[in-house]
Amino acid sequence: ADQAPVAEVPPQAALQSGTLAVKSLEQVRAEVLAALTYPWQNLPGGWRIEFVGPRKGYRGSTFPDEHLIRIYVRPELSFQDLLHVTAHELGHAIDVSLLTPQDRSDWSVVRGRQPNSAWWAGSGETDFSSGAGDFAECFAWSQTTSGGWYSKLGDPPSSQEIELLHQMIG
């Protein structure tokens, strides 16, 4: 299996629970993945999650064709930020692996949108302005309520919406 290179993470990125330590990307990865409650290893297709160095303008990316999530660790990101972005990207992996068009339509309605609303970000739009981005943010919120809320389509999900989300994804 391809492994991301292990590199030192600047101390600011390894700040967790008030402790400051220089950690390898693999150590940061292990801590973040241990904090997720969703059994992502069971997703169809054998998804991989890599933690790599910074990429300008990105905190994370999901590559559906490769079943790969890549998290771009930057010095200013806290543990909670990294947990949130990892959960957000995992939300995209869950979307493309498990959701049906009907699920996406139903989720759009739950979130106050029309059932036939566009799901994927259009040209020039941000992920956070799309149904897919809102779903990913809602999934991230179900994993951690810290690290920010970025969806442009609505407020953080209610407990009822989180319960429905978990019913949809098993």
Image (tube, rainbow, N blue to C red):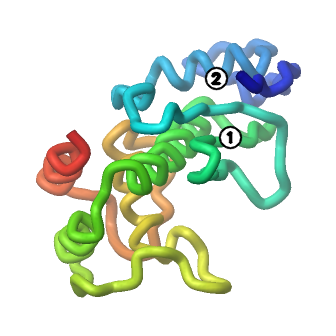
Which amino acid type is marked by label 2? Answer: Arg
Q: Which of 29 and 12 lies nearest the eye of the viewer?
A: 29
Give the SS element for disc 1.
strand
Between discs 2 and 1, the one toward the N terminus = 2
Q: Quadrant of residue 12?
A: top right
Give the SS element for disc 2.
helix
Q: Position of residue 80 (x, y in %)?
A: 54, 35
Distance in Å between CA atoms under marks 2 and 1: 9 Å
Indicate left or right for 142 with 115 as reference.
right
Q: What residue do we see at 33% from left, 66% from top?
A: 155
Quarter of the picture containing the N terminus is top right
Indicate left or right for 77 with 82 as reference.
right
Q: Which of 16 and 169 lies nearest the eye of the viewer?
A: 169
Mark 2 closeness class: few <14, some 14–19, many ≥20 residues within 10 Å: many
Q: Which residue is mark 2?
A: 29
Note whether 117 is above or below 35 in the view shown: below
Q: What residue do we see at 22% from left, 82% from top?
A: 115
The circle drawn on residue 71 is 1
Q: Position of residue 36 (x, y in %)?
A: 42, 27
Quarter of the picture containing the C terminus is top left
Q: Position of residue 154 (x, y in %)?
A: 34, 72
Q: Which of 60 and 84 lies nearest the eye of the viewer?
A: 60
Which amino acid type is marked by label 1? Answer: Ile
- Contact, CB < 8 Å: mark 2 with mark 1? yes
Q: What residue do we see at 45% from left, 42% from top?
A: 146
Count of numbered labels shown in the rendering: 2
Q: What residue do we see at 67% from left, 85% from top?
A: 124
Q: Quadrant of residue 104?
A: bottom left
Q: Position of residue 58 (x, y in %)?
A: 73, 55
Mark 1 closeness class: few <14, some 14–19, many ≥20 residues within 10 Å: many
